[in-house]
Image (tube, rainbow, N blue to C red):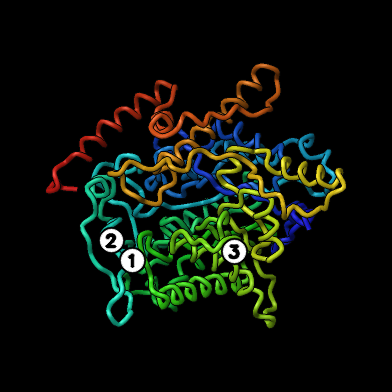
Amino acid sequence: MANELFSQVTLPCGRTIPNRLVKVAMYEHLANLFGGPPNAYHFNLYSAWSKQKWGMVITGNVQVCPEHLSLGRDMVIPREVNEDTLEPFAQLARSIHGTEKDYSSSREPCSRALAIMQISHAGRQSPNFLGGRKPLVPPLAPSPVRLGSSRRTESVAGATVLEEIVPPLPLRALFQIPREMTVDDIKDVQQAFVRASLTAMKSGFDGVQLHCAHGYLLSQFLNPKSNLRKDAYSCAPENELRMVREIVDAIRAVVPQDFVVGLKINSADYLEADERPSDYTVTKEMNRVLSHIRSMAHWGTIDFIEISGGDYESPDFLSTKVTTPRQAFFEHFSKTATKALESNPAARISLPSILLTGGLRSPAHLQMALDARHAHLFGFGRSSVIRPDLPTVLRERIERSWASGGPMSIASDDEPFVNEPDSRMKSLSWFPDVKLIGATMGIAWYVVRIRRIAQWQMHESLADGKSGGLPPFNYNRAGIPSMLEMWIWMDWSSTLQAFVVFLVAAYFVFLPPNGYL
């Protein structure tokens, strides 16, 4: 069964993925401050992944609107698409695809990885100072609901209601009350996603992935906490997917038939981070997310749906221990999503592949998920940063077992692919727990690791004319040192900009509670 991991998967659009291992999106934090096109750091970073026979490589989120960045160093789609603005993105696509030498020696046909651009809009999660807007200009969102200003609770009767709360001071300093989008705003954003898809297509990418997770704009339209609208884009069952579907339909209208269009959703977005839900709420939200998956699948326009939001390391079919309600929700959801899609034999369309992302840290986890048919594709984020050569490592383990007379199965191989940094690294107690990639010190370690891979590739290339190898691990440089290194470049022009932004941000963070933000 292990060789199934390296078997091809054909998507509904007709494109073939050479194997089931996917490098999923991780925030790189490598673009210019306040956003820009991909640069030499991105090219060298993705060239490290291109040499390792991944089936599909998905970029970190590329923002479709320069006024709605996440952490300030996002890649951004240009306002005008022409030969000059396309070239950096074309070079990034070439870096992912690799040279003919990188894949011509592979034993599998069509072994070149698919290059997928993740496109995103931060919505209300676009912060002050780093979000790309002028001071005091609010971000756009479905409704004027500030991040952290409400939470879901259950009434005595079991119904779900919204309770208004006062957001913590750092949240009030970092995130404004957003401006409710008009219908014209919605149409403009939809066209921005179309422009991003055309940019990807014209620059040589094989497809795009719409980021509908982690609290970004498209997931805000799906969330009754952040979408209080009463119009055609409300969270009513007949309207809640309208925003996403109209974007997908508009993209399909302008790209070739074999252009890949994927979606990313997060099962954890359907439950509160600190929520201890009743069985009724869990069942209701499970049915809701499965309904979304079924509807998206039966549009006939989606090639793959990435599902993230949990940890596969300790699922209930490996252990009776359940850590959090959200993890339990993800574990149950991951087991039912694929079956839910395949439960309608009357469907006359090619169903999208399910890409499962979440804690697949050993061959045994992969084998178990594969045997149970929980997914068609398997995504790696943090593990792909520590070991960009993970597909090579996995293949070597399988071949070593086979050569020693053992089975091709890897079900008994529970040794982790990589040793991850100390999981006890936590955010500062006063720092807001928001869903922006990079908000915790643990993630900062991975951002620094990403930068080191890019720099290593650049230095290797300058030294001998070719890039290769990987930088050594530094597990001791964690926590606050990683946060500082993440935010402060050794490029002095960027460092000066970052320092000025830090001073301005610090001023507003320590405003009194009656400050005007």
| Structural crowding at the residue carrying mark 3, measured as other residues with C-alpha within 10 Å and reported as few (<14), some (14–19) or many (≥20) | few
Position above or below: 335 against 141: below
Residue denoted by label 1: 225
Q: Position of residue 480 (x, y in %)?
A: 38, 32
Asked whether residue 47 is in view, the answer is: yes
Residue denoted by label 3: 253
Closer to the camera: disc 1 or disc 2?
1
**Quadrant of res 489:** top left
| Mark with earlier residue (3, 1) | 1
Residue denoted by label 2: 145
| Structural crowding at the residue carrying mark 2, measured as other residues with C-alpha within 10 Å and reported as few (<14), some (14–19) or many (≥20) | many
Tag 1 near tag 2, CB within 8 Å: yes
Q: Position of residue 112 (x, y in %)?
A: 74, 45
Q: Residue at x 54, y 32 (%)?
A: 39
Q: Residue at x 56, y 36 (%)?
A: 84
Q: Position of residue 308 (x, y in %)?
A: 53, 57
| Mark with earlier residue (2, 3) | 2
